[in-house]
Image (spheres, rainbow, N blue to C red):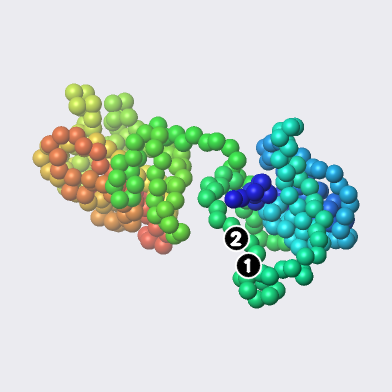
Amino acid sequence: GYDLNGLLAYRVAMNKILDGATGGYDEQTNNAESLMHYYVNVEAINPADVSRKIPFLTLGSNLNRGDTLTYRARLQTLEEIIGEISLVSGLGYQIRLDLENKLFIFEALQGEDKSSVVKLSPNLGNVKSIEYMYDEMTSRNVAIVGGEGEGASRYFVVSGGQNYTFTRDSIAYTTDGRRVEVNEPRFETGKFGKAFLIEKGTTNLAHDPATDINWWNAAPTSGIIWGYVNEYSATEKALKITSFSHSHHGHSFYLNIQRDTYFTIRANIKNVKNPLRSLCLALYNSADTCVKTNYVPDILAQYNWNNHNTPDYSEGWITYKIPSGVYTDAVKYTIQF
């Protein structure tokens, strides 16, 4: 089975790297046994971040054995560090269980030359590797990300190590239209497989039609003469489009253009007469002159929006953006539907 030395496999050398001290490395020169004790102590027994402490782990007696070595630690596991020092110095090591005192004791072991009785070894060509690990501990809860640069100029960010609760106070949808309930995270397939979709804060740009119907029926000062008339129905508690033709000047709200930024329209929709058309926009310049009608933006995803036609309210949404480089003089738009 796996011995207690496996405790060292899940501690990464982080002492001194985050503040850039000593060029971003924890470099030490000492005898091999003291080096082992030093790194185990600063990374697992008395680390600067107390949350990284391994409970009940302590150091055994240091007999200062082994040649004087210099070692540079940064982001290796403790298992790698102690293993490399052990290989160079000829010292072994173990974590011993002290049942009486309820402690895990790290200690170095003096190696003995047993080469005369060795029958299996990589040096003899009959063993591929002296190490085999089968690890079922696949979960990790801390990510360490390093930027460009070397030594003290390299920037590190540590994230995780805490318990987080995901919250979202509204339903949402994946890009394929699957409904995701309140407080349930969304997962999407990305460049490197399926990943958790980060929820960004959103702002509702629409005014309440019960109190500001004029915002929805903003009249253009120049340009096209088409439009539709809206009114708020207190009975339905909804915005009702009463008519649409070239003789009407009322139309929907203006929104400022934010290039390459996705927006989502989400609504409960009931069709009384006609199905909902695919999304089209009218673009305006800073002088309120319409520069483009029937503009179709880039559609990221939609659900139950295009040709929506139901006799009872059902939810539909569409996510779109206006990219850079198209109608560059346009600064705002309205929705034609």
Q: Residue at x 44, y 51 (%)?
A: 195
Left or right of 41? Residue 331 is left
Q: Position of residue 174 (x, y in %)?
A: 34, 47
Q: Nearer the viewer, residue 141 or 38?
A: 38
Mark 2 surroundings within 10 Å by alpha-carbon count, few (fewer than 14), some (14 through 19), many (20 or more):
few
* Amino acid residing under circle 1: Ser
Q: Residue furthest front?
A: 117
Q: Residue furthest left?
A: 273
Q: Is residue 220 visible?
A: no
Q: Residue furthest bottom?
A: 125
The residue indicated by pointer 1 is: 129
Left or right of 318? Residue 330 is right
Q: Residue at x 64, y 55 (%)?
A: 146
Residue 291, numbered circle = none
Estimate the spatial distance between the alpha carbons at disc 2 and disc 1, rounded to whole Å: 7 Å
The residue indicated by pointer 2 is: 132
